[in-house]
Amino acid sequence: MGTVFAEITLKNASDAGKAQEGVIEEQHIRSVTVNSIVDTGSMSLVITEELRQKLGLRINGQKSVRTANGQRVSCGLTEAVEIHWKNRSTTQRAVVLAGAEEVLLGAIPLEDMDLIVDPVRQELAGAHGDDVVCLVM
């Protein structure tokens, strides 16, 4: 299977909360629409440092990660970011990978939005059609 891309919108979740409370206006929510690589081999949302700065996301911790080439690196973990794809959304922390050039949409946000990669069409699709089904145990 080839590389699958998906257009997603990322929003600063703190800004979104402030807008919901009426502290800021909706148009002041920092957000960016990007074409991300759908990477089921990655666990999280991985963003670039430039994107972190555009969204105004603070680094709230560090995480040791293993990259696709097997290298272990320490990466920053951001505060919450909203991830939107079509009619679905989730809120996650993002991993900021130094030197990253593209955004990776990993398995955890995909699962949380009930999405799969359709291997025939090579695109994102709802795991249960148009209905979002979340597993609870």
Image: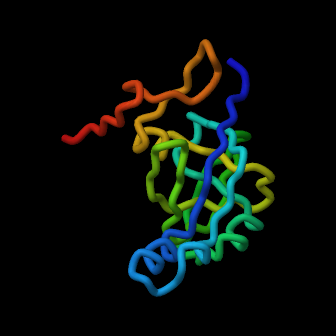
The percent position of residue 58, horizontal first and vertical second, equals 59, 77
Residue 5, compared with residue 101, is above or below; it is: above
**Left or right for 62, reference 1:** left
Give the camera-side residue of 24 and 83.
24
Counting from the top left corner in percent of width and height, residue 66 is at 62, 48
Residue at x 73% of width, y 60% of height: 48
Residue that appears at 63% across and 65% down? 31
In the image, residue 18 sits, relative to residue 4, either above or below, namely below
Residue 118 versus residue 31 in the image, above or below = above
The quarter of the picture where the N terminus appears is: top right
90 or 39: which is nearer to us?
90
> Which quarter of the picture shows residue 106?
top right
Q: Quadrant of the C terminus?
A: top left
**Residue furthest out toward the bottom:** 23
The residue sitting at 31% across, 35% down in the picture is: 133
In the displayed orientation, state which residue is furthest to the left: 137
Which x, y percent locates residue 33? Answer: 68, 54
Please report the residue visible at 45 percent of the width from the left and 29 percent of the height from the top. 126
